[in-house]
Image (spheres, coloured by chain):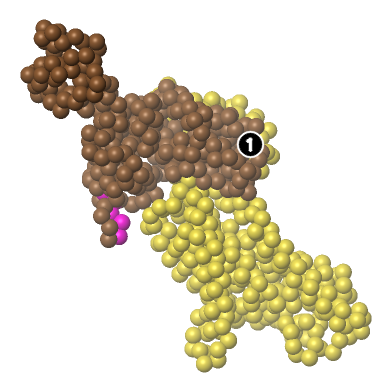
């Protein structure tokens, strides 16, 4: 990115920036004049954080795995149904919507999201969120960011922003990959919704996009939880493992009927509510409950992460 | 925003203390005073509390007691105003191995909210040039040698013009050539007027580049002041070279010289600290008594002697 900046920065170098000696030499040993920061300069850290996240080999590998899942599902369904004809409903096994894929490739998007939401998608979020602070601490770069000075609150906000953007990127990766595979392997056309109404393919696409956003929002609670775990340790691997472990534990708790009473408070409780976007009219109640629950998790664990991170001694 | 008051002290701590859970204090009651424009050597064996002190100065660790003022403002409250004017190298460099040297610097520059993004590339280029890394700027940092990493860390500390540079063991792990280069760079920066706070466990390094020094041991400050005064604090031993060593010992004892030892034709002893005799009188007395003097003088005192005199122990012993 800096290479792209070069010519522009070189040109602006000519105008004498007030408060900063253009030559970079301290002026005769006297006080370096206080620099007047521009109002938007502090956003540089957010941009840097996003660039850093998506330049990591690990992030790209996770996205590649996510992109591969719809391909596997698509090929499996294609082979199973022998290429044409109508499969008979899939017999009630497998992810939701899988039976409709052969009629309409767009359903591969819904199937892929339903298949990855319980584990694969949140696992990737757990890895990225868990590593956010702990990884910097482990590598030692955290101390240099803080004396830069990034500011602890600003750094935490930048990290959270990057993780939330990753949630969206991960979900869109699954959705777009599924759409491409679906269009290539299966017929597409008008979409019959769960409520029986038929809408145009274009509206189906819009609803698919809305579903992807709803799924991404579903992951925000886990992102905040992972970020909190990340402030507790100096080992990125430990934070990732803990976050993913918590995810598995919560999913198991959610599957035990005797623990009915706590289920509404578990962050995956309303995850499958995205299917309600395929009804006409849309059934909002569960979707809004999900939004509220994710917001609650983000507030509680975001605050906990902030309280922990701003009071912590950085000894690595 | 009014300009910070100009003071002659760049770093000032009062009663600075850090006590980790349950243990003895890592730093106890530290009153440090770093004059503006000095190259300040911060000496002490490993484990003496140097790094904990530096981290408290920079706001990474919260003190258990006492206070810090840097560039005239309280830390860590004024960190946002103070730290952009402070460059730091803390316990060795830390880099993003998958980023190039140039992108590493751009990352640290972006973390500074007072850094203009429009001039970022120019700043990064200058810093790379200053530490001689321009040719390797495009390579991933994980392929760098330790010396190159150290230089990149220094480049990060030099991204902006600074009032104060805090360098924690900057020559650690470098070969002699690299150490010389770093020392030359420190001198150059000091000549520009930047105050340099240099922690080290290498006495000769401090002696070579520092104007002032403080000595820590077991979390406490033993002494601080100009290097010349610290060395003068420990008295040099009198050395007389003579074939008549027995006579020389007798005469010197009469003049109050203590701790006399004879090694062949070399007689050494401690000149009394209270009311010391003039060396010229001593020499005249020796000659009057028929002692044939080949050489007469005082051993030069190194900072190491001063340190041993202060701590009564070897330097590399950690507490």
- Under circle 1, the secondary element is loop
Instruction: Write the residue at 74% across / 77% down.
Output: A111
**Which chain is represented by brown in the image?**
B
Image quadrant containing the N terminus of chain B: top left
Report the side of B196 relative to B285 (left or right).
right
- The magenta-colored residue range is B16-21
A291 in relation to B172, above or below: below
Report the side of A48 relative to B185 (left or right).
right
In percent of width and height, residue B157 lies at: 48, 37
In percent of width and height, residue B287 lies at: 14, 8
Instruction: Write the residue at 68% across / 33% down.
Output: A7
Q: Nearer the viewer, residue B311 or B210?
A: B311
Is A33 one of the magenta-colored residues? no
Q: Nearer the viewer, residue A88 or A57?
A: A57
Q: Nearer the viewer, residue B240 or A116?
A: B240
Is B17 one of the magenta-colored residues? yes
Colour used to depict chain A in the structure image: yellow
Give the quarter of the image for residue B79: top left
A194 in relation to A24, above or below: below
């Amino acid at each position: 990115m800096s290479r792209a900046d070069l010519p522009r920065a070189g040109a602006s170098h000519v105008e004498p920036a007030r408060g900063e000696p253009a030559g970079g030499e301290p002026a005769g040993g006297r006080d370096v004049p206080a620099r007047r920061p521009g109002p938007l300069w502090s956003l540089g850290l957010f941009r840097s954080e996003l660039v850093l996240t998506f330049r990591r080999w690990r992030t790209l590998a996770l996205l590649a795995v996510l992109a591969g899942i719809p391909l596997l599902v698509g090929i499996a369904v294609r082979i199973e149904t022998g290429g044409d004809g109508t499969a008979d409903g899939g017999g009630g096994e497998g992810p939701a919507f899988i039976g409709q894929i052969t009629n309409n490739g767009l359903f591969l998007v819904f199937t892929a999201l339903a298949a990855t939401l319980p584990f694969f998608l949140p696992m990737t979020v757990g890895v990225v969120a868990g590593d956010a602070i702990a990884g910097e601490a482990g590598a030692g770069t955290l101390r240099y960011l803080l004396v830069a000075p990034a500011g602890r609150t600003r750094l935490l906000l930048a990290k959270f922003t990057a993780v939330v953007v990753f949630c969206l990127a991960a979900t869109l990766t699954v959705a777009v990959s599924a759409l491409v595979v679906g269009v290539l392997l299966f017929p597409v056309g008008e979409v019959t919704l769960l409520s029986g109404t038929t809408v145009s393919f274009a509206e189906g696409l819009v609803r698919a996009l809305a579903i992807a956003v709803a799924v991404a929002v579903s992951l925000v609670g886990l992102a905040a939880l992972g970020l909190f775990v990340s402030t507790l340790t100096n080992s990125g691997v430990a934070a990732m493992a803990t976050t993913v472990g918590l995810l598995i534990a919560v999913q198991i708790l959610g599957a035990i009927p005797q623990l009915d009473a706590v289920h509404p408070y578990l962050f995956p409780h309303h995850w499958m509510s995205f299917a309600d976007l395929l009804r006409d009219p849309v059934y909002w109640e569960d979707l809004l409950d999900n939004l509220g629950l994710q917001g609650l998790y983000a507030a509680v664990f975001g605050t906990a992460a902030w309280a922990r991170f701003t009071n912590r001694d950085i000894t690595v | 925003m009014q300009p910070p008051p100009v003071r002659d002290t760049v770093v000032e701590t009062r009663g600075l203390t850090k006590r980790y859970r349950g243990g003895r204090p890592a730093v106890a009651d530290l009153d440090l005073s770093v004059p503006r424009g000095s190259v300040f050597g911060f000496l002490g064996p490993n484990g003496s509390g140097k790094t904990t002190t530096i981290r408290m100065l920079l706001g990474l660790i919260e003190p258990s007691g006492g206070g810090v003022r840097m560039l005239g403002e309280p830390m860590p409250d004024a960190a946002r105003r103070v730290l952009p004017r402070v460059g730091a190298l803390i316990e060795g460099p830390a880099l993003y191995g998958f980023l190039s040297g140039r992108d590493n610097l751009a990352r640290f520059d972006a973390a500074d909210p007072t850094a203009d993004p429009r001039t970022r590339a120019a700043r990064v280029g200058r810093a790379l040039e200053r530490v001689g890394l321009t040719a390797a700027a495009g390579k991933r940092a994980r392929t760098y040698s330790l010396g190159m990493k150290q230089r990149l860390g220094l480049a990060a500390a030099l991204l902006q013009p600074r009032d104060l540079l805090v360098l924690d063991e900057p020559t650690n792990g470098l070969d002699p050539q690299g150490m010389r280069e770093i020392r030359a760079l420190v001198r150059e920066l000091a000549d520009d007027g930047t105050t340099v706070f240099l922690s080290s466990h290498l006495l000769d390094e401090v002696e070579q580049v520092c104007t002032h020094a403080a000595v820590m041991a077991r979390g406490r400050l033993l002494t601080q002041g100009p290097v010349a005064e610290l060395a003068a604090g420990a008295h040099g031993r009198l050395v007389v070279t003579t074939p008549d060593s027995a006579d020389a010992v007798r005469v010197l004892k009469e003049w109050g010289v203590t701790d006399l030892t004879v090694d062949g034709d070399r007689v050494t002893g401690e000149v009394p600290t209270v009311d010391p005799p003039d060396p010229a009188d001593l020499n005249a007395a020796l000659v009057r008594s028929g002692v044939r003097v080949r050489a007469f003088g005082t051993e030069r005192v190194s900072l190491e002697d001063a340190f041993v005199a202060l701590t009564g122990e070897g330097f590399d012993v950690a507490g």
